[in-house]
Image (tube, helix red, strand yellow):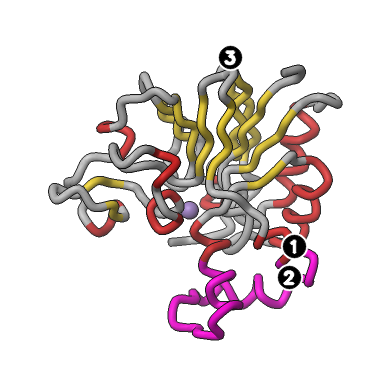
């Protein structure tokens, strides 16, 4: 396939950093930009990020933040909403909801033997059989084999440490100060909304392009 495959990590409403990164990438006609989910919440303007995504990205994958908003829209049950989700709800248009509803869980590039996903995978079953509640949320793998958040079991290994591909997986969701590159995975959520940076990974070279966050927008 012609052009570059470019994965971009968690944007979380940081539209200025996203725009700057798109400029820095000097996109060409055949490039495929894939956003790794969590476009929304926490940062300054979720709707602007979706507008930019619609314009410049080939597609965006489902993150746990989009999943949470979509579940709320479907059920009307606000139990799982967080405080700053309400700011996002005010910003979203009918078009934005349609865009979020169409987000797939994974993007498989068979030519490059790479899979893009928001959070990650359990070692089994096969990656393409794992449901949204795992692939949009997993950080660590508990002793009994279940997928958990880091905070739920801080001593459990990160899923990437027990992932022996193929395929090679590029993911976001676990915010860190730097990209984490292992034999079979690359984590590119570099904490933009927390004042870190926004990261793009150009495949197949795995070249990293970053922009610094202009400020710290969110305190966990
Ligand atoms: Mn996430």
Please identify the dominant SS of the magenta region. helix
User: Vertical placement of 76 versus 156: above or below?
Assistant: below
Is residue 190 shown to the viewer in this render?
A: no
- Locate residue 184, reporting x and y percent: 38, 23
Q: Callout 3: few (<14), some (14-19), or many (20+) C-alpha neighbours within 10 Å? A: few
Q: Does the magenta portion include 83?
A: yes
The residue pinned by badge 1 equals: 47
Q: Which residues are magenta?
A: 68-97
Classify mark 2 as within 8 Å of ligand 1 or not, answering yes or no: no
Q: Callout 2: few (<14), some (14-19), or many (20+) C-alpha neighbours within 10 Å? A: some
Residue shown at the point (39%, 48%) measured from the top left:
130
Check whether the beta carbons of the residues at disc 3 and disc 1 lie within 8 A of each other: no
**In front here: 142 or 154?**
142
Say which quarter of the image contains residue 209: top right
Residue placed furthest toward the left: 143
Check whether the beta carbons of the residues at disc 2 and disc 1 lie within 8 A of each other: yes
- Locate residue 12, reporting x and y percent: 60, 55
The residue pinned by badge 2 equals: 92
**Which numbered disc flags the more N-terminal residue, 2 or 3?**
2
Is 179 placed left or right of 143 in the picture? right
Residue shown at the point (60%, 77%) measured from the top left:
73
- Locate residue 136, reporting x and y percent: 45, 52
The local secondary structure at tag 2 comes to loop
**Which numbered disc flags the more N-terminal residue, 3 or 1?**
1
Residue shown at the point (80%, 41%) measured from the top left:
56
User: Vertical placement of 55 versus 167: above or below?
Assistant: below
User: Vertical placement of 91 versus 179: above or below?
Assistant: below
The local secondary structure at tag 3 comes to loop
Mark number, residue 205:
3
Q: Quadrant of the N terminus?
A: top right
Say which quarter of the image contains residue 120: top left
Residue placed furthest toward the top: 205
């Amino acid at each position: 396939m012609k052009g570059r495959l470019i994965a971009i990590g968690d944007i979380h409403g940081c539209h200025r950093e996203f725009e700057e990164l798109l400029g820095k990438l000097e996109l060409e006609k055949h490039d495929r930009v894939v956003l790794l989910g969590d476009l929304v919440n926490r940062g300054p303007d979720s709707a602007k990020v979706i507008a930019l995504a619609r314009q410049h990205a080939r597609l965006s994958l489902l993150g746990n933040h989009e999943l949470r908003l979509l579940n709320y829209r479907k059920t009307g049950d606000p139990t799982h909403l967080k405080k700053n989700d309400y700011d996002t709800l005010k910003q979203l248009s009918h078009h934005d909801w349609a865009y979020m509803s169409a987000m797939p869980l994974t993007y498989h590039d068979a030519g490059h033997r790479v899979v893009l996903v928001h959070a990650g995978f359990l070692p089994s079953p096969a990656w393409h059989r794992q449901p949204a509640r795992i692939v949009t949320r997993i950080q660590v793998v508990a002793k009994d084999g279940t997928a958990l958040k880091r905070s739920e079991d801080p001593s459990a290994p990160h899923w990437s440490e027990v992932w022996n591909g193929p395929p090679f997986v590029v993911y976001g969701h676990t915010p860190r100060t730097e990209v984490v590159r292992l034999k079979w995975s690359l984590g590119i959520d570099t904490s933009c909304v927390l004042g870190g940076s926004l990261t793009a990974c150009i495949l197949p070279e795995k070249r990293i392009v970053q922009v610094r966050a202009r400020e710290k927008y969110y305190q966990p």
